[in-house]
Image (spheres, rainbow, N blue to C red):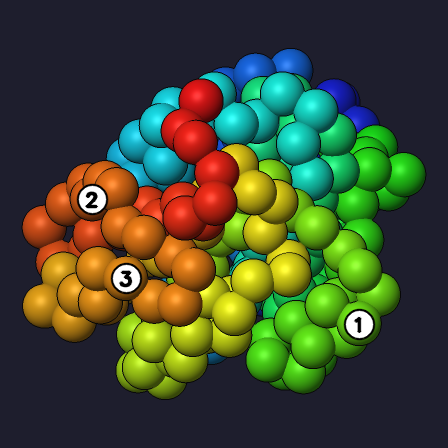
Amino acid sequence: MGGSGARSLPSSLIPMRVLAGAFKGRRLVTPKGDRTRPTADQVRIALLDTLMPWLPDANVLDLFAGAGGVGLEALSRGAAHATFVERDPKAIAALRTNVETLGVRDATRVLRGDVHRELAHLHAEGARFMVIFLDPPYEADAVGPTLEQLGGGGLTLPNGVVIAQHLTKRAPAERIGALVQFRTRRFGETTLTFYRMTSGPLP
């Protein structure tokens, strides 16, 4: 466009931006349509601000990742590595574009597939994470089953946290396996619920 050398985005993509940290202001893309739902800026800011004690040099797992806004924001704020799990091909394409745009290929891993199957694979590999975030499609009603799988332990470090984004009217249980709820933040119809492992102290 104009003389800047910037290219217009494909009509299938819409822009968003990194909100804070090393990549603040850098443009990201997310696919149009209702297959994925990017986390709203207000929610993303509140989420990452709350997670700041856990983020330095952390391994982060972004489930139902869409175009990767949360995991990439975590990298911008000091996380060491982010693993993304997403199955929608358009979201995966946008996510890979965003990884290349930010130049963080070496600090990321993108897994395309069903979240529950990929969690089982990660567990078998012995992967461990300080921060795990899940934001499944609201119509899928997948928050409870995913938390139950994570509550079995093995993927979360002893002092790690798991955060679920969900409809406010569909609050998950206060305790799920080894996960114990310690905080909620509500944004109208959307709520963030924070869990910690029972074996680990809060920072």
Instruction: Relative to 126, say whether 90 is above or below.
Output: below
**Which residue: 70% across, 24% down?**
57
Q: Are marks 3 and 2 in contact (CB under 8 Å)?
A: no
Front residue of 151/137: it is: 151
> Residue 116 location in percent, x, y?
59, 80
Q: CA distance from mark 2 to mark 1?
A: 31 Å
Front residue of 125/73: it is: 125
Residue occupied by mark 2? 184
Q: CA distance from mark 1 to mark 3?
A: 24 Å
| Callout 1 secondary element | helix
**Which residue: 14% across, 61% down?**
168
Going from the N terminus, do you reach mark 1 or mark 3 first? 1
Residue 125 in sight: yes
Residue occupied by mark 1? 124
The quarter holding residue 183 reads top left
Q: CA distance from mark 3 to mark 2?
A: 13 Å
Front residue of 130/109: it is: 130
| Callout 3 secondary element | strand
Task: Classify the position of the C terminus by image quarter.
Answer: top left
Amino acid on which the number 3 mark rests in the picture: Arg
**Which residue: 61% across, 45% down?**
157
Amino acid on which the number 2 mark rests in the picture: Thr
Front residue of 154/51: it is: 154
